[in-house]
Image (tube, helix red, strand yellow):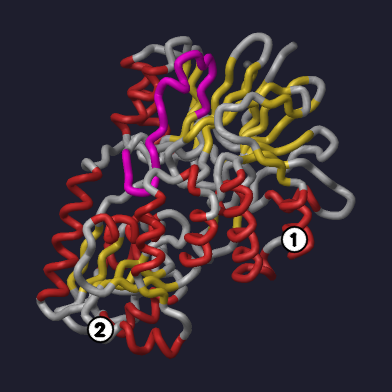
Amino acid sequence: MDYYLKILGGGREVGRSAIEIGNSNGSLVMDYGVNFDANDNPNFPLQELPGKVKGFLVSHGHLDHVGALPIYEISTLKKPIYGTPMTKALAHLILRDFVKLSGPKIPFEWVEIDKAIKNFNTIEFGKEEEIEGFKVRMTNAGHIPGSAQIHIMTEKMKVTYTGDINTADTKLMDPANPDDLRDTDVLIMEATYGRFNHPGRKSVEKEFLDKVKEVIEGGGTVLVPAFSLNRSQELLSLFASVDFPYPVYYDGMSREITEVMLQHKDYLHKPELLKKAYDSFHYVNGFNERKKVWKDKGVIVASAGMLKGGPAVYYYKKLAEDSKNAVFLVSYQAPSTPGRKLLEIGKFDEFSPMLKARFELFDFSSHSGKADLMKLVRSAKNLQKLIIVHSAADSAEHFAAVVKEEIGVDVIAPENGQEIKL
């Protein structure tokens, strides 16, 4: 039987991941997420004929991988969804938050989210499952808790979709195991950082902790804008690992997500650290507390990670004018976001004053960089074809050229809508 891949989203772009694998009997779609334009409007993947799609395989719970899933639960449609138990729980929170923040801009409501979660079937790592005529297995991707590489075994080949993948050993996550790719014939790989390498995680952690202490000991308060899902928990675990001697506050959706993670401890590298952080550090419960904690000399981990909204914006406005304070970014800053504006022009936006507080960016990426991506490709000893997704066009083309030159396999950096015969 002949198989094909079709790129419904994530082709020569970051986010909006959606990859269809199918044959004459039907197809499965791996991820179905969203990304956003410059005006913060959500972009949805291409749609396939509902009768053709048998179900969805989900790599992890970030919005750019799950945000469009409820579209296939509208009206009489009822498509099964498969992923790890952690991903199911996180996707529920993330989708509900998406509707809360962007409701008028999206083509589904609460009822479709509830249907999607009701139709979400869980798969544990390492167990092979028969799903709609496909043999499927999931293994740890190292990106966020519950994140999976998706392996599909056909009578002719093994196809692996990495989802978002990370081989770094972090306080929150065990790294992805390159041996999981050893017998892969077709590899669908993210290359978000296909042009760059990351510094060693231990050196980043040490520098970050040293500079947070330096600011606090100099009489200042440190704001760390951080994603509620994964980055906040990693930083809280880091502070817990060193018995951080100063006040640590956290604010936003991260508490609810932390509670979900602690209910699924098997997906955490060091669950005792996250539990210690949850028990020891102070969650900011409401606006009255928020008005007080920024005056304390400590560190505040607050959403959102790109300063697009959330409590981090409140703290920024309170702390930005004092040079004793600091704003430490810890994640990728998308174009047109306030975080990117700070990096480019030193201001929150064109109309704001220059930032006076100390300002730095620390690379806590949960994606593998160029060198580690190459190691993953080399670990696939049977590799015949590499398909690069979840990567801007320049990054995808650069990484494709490097792989072709060094390894010599067939490499494709497809556009959305492109169909690839296997």
The magenta stretch spans residue 381: no
Residue type marked 1: Phe
Q: Which mark is residue 386?
A: none
Q: Which mark is residue 108?
A: 1
Report the side of 113 relative to 303 (left or right): right
Q: Position of residue 122 (x, y in %)?
A: 67, 41
Q: Locate the N terminus and report the quarter of the image it occupies.
A: top right
Query: Marks 1/2: CA distance?
Result: 42 Å
Q: Nearer the viewer, residue 160 or 333?
A: 160
Residue type marked 2: Asp
Magenta extent: 169-188
Q: Nearer the viewer, residue 296 or 382?
A: 296
Q: Is residue 8 visible?
A: no
Q: Which residue is mark 2?
A: 296
Q: Locate the C terminus and report the quarter of the image it occupies.
A: top right
Q: Position of residue 229 (x, y in %)?
A: 47, 57
SS of the residue under disc 2: loop
Give above or below for 255 relative to 381. below
Residue at 63% over, 49% down: 88
Q: Nearer the viewer, residue 353 or 296?
A: 296
Residue at 34% over, 47% down: 365
